[in-house]
Amino acid sequence: MASASPIIGFDEFAAYLNKIFKITLSDIKILIREFHTEMQKGLTGYESSLKMIPSYVDRPNGKEKGQYIALDLGGTNFRVLSVELDGRGNASVTAVSKFAIDIADMQGTAEQLFGFIANCIHQFIEENQLDKRIQYDLAFTFSFPVDQTNIAAGKLLVWTKGFTAKGVEGEDVIVLLNEALKKKDIHCIRVAALANDTVGTLVARSYKDPSCDLGVILGTGTNACYPEKLVNIQKWRGLDPKGHMIINMEWGNFNKLRLTNYDKDLDLASPNTGAQFLEKMVSGMYLGEITRLVVQDMIHRGLIFLGSKCTAFEKKGSLLTENMSLVAEDNSANLGEVEFFLKSKGITNITAHDKNILKHVCDLVSTRAAKISGGSIAAVLSWMDPELKNKHTVGIDGSLFEKYPGFARKIKATCKDVFGENALNIEIVHAKDGSGKGAAIIAAVAAQSEK
Ligand code: GLC
């Protein structure tokens, strides 16, 4: 429970909330400096909250061609896709199946999780009548911190986003996938590439747009990647001194941010206490929970719902980021969506004051998240191009970016605050379905280099 500070009246408490959730331009400038220090340490191989993981791929040239199967694991759903690359910069999804992941598979054992994946692939093969005499190259988007050792191998360092399946951390996920495919008698699949979703997003966008040099996910979790000069990756010296390699930053683990008591409580109650602090302040898996903790605190202090001790928000997970989106969308004077949401929680005596407070708390929590996202984007762009002299396209995917009202606008505003007029050189685009398509392109790059 967030420790109760000696604040009694509503106005004082509201001022306190405004203060603790506020992110100023000076906070953003500090964030950028700290990001650069952590990036440097991560690239050198020193202890850092930014893991800066080499991905073993550079951006594509747009000529990659062929049909690929892609797997996308990393959020609440698992997807199997068939992707067609035409060799002229166009990647299209020709078939896709989406499967909800049971909590039992997410938090059980490696056998359960990879068995589930193999079952979904089997179903996809049957439903789409794939010719089992052909060998299909498969690309695996596995959106967790993986220590890659080549384009198709890598060990899971640590689970994030609520996954805890035993027997996966420290193991090569491609070996686990191959074992599961074998067990299920699936022989028409060859696993050709392993990629993080950020890397897929960057690769997919840069397939048709060479100015894209930053891939970002703002969804269940958050992370980013960018192409780094090989000479700067001191912990991994490549052969070609002029070459680049995409670095998966794992920025969700950045830990130099000022935490509120609500953030600390959320962290303590999470399965990965002490890790992923930026992710816990920014991404879709957590924003609802931070808001819930604030609302619950206000209930305990008698500052909302006419001082009634309602229990609607006692339970972890009883307020979701999707609920916040609806509340944020509500522009009408009588806040109908907010009222509807509160009623769905069994709260009946709802005043205009209550509705406004809820809307305001959602706004505080989501604005902080958007500003931290914008500041982190500015940090990576200024690392690559300190004066921002060149054009940069930032490809972003994820439900928070796509669906949360005002989120994209606030990210852009933060970049404008940091770079002034030079922010005109930044184009922020929604890179939809990037991770699946991008993984297919990576598989094509891998297949080409094998030849
Ligand atoms: C988490 C994962 C990271 C992934 C991100 C977005 O932060 O650790 O690998 O890219 O979520 O899905």
Image (cartoon, helix red, strand yellow):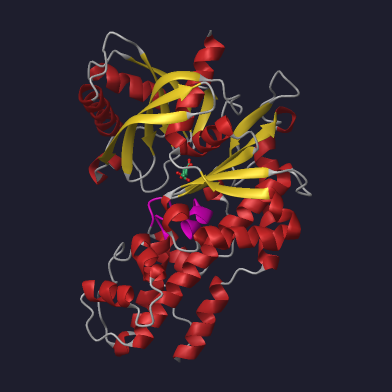
Tell me the chief SS of the magenta region. Answer: loop
| Magenta-colored span | 270-286
Q: Is residue 299 left or right of residue 403?
A: left
**Residue at 58% from the left image edge and 58% from the top image edge:** 411
**Nearer-the-camera pick, 296 or 210:** 210
Left or right: residue 197 versus residue 351 is right
Whether residue 184 is in magenta: the answer is no
Q: Where is residue 111 drawn, in percent x and y?
A: 27, 29
Above or below residue 405? Residue 2 is below
Q: Position of residue 227 (x, y in %)?
A: 64, 34
Q: Quadrant of residue 286?
A: bottom left
Residue visible at 31% across and 32% down?
110
Q: Is residue 89 visible?
A: yes
Q: Position of residue 303 (x, y in %)?
A: 38, 87
Q: Is residue 282 inside the magenta stretch? A: yes
Compare residues 120 and 440 and report the one nearer the observer. Answer: 440
Residue found at x 73% / y 33%: 232
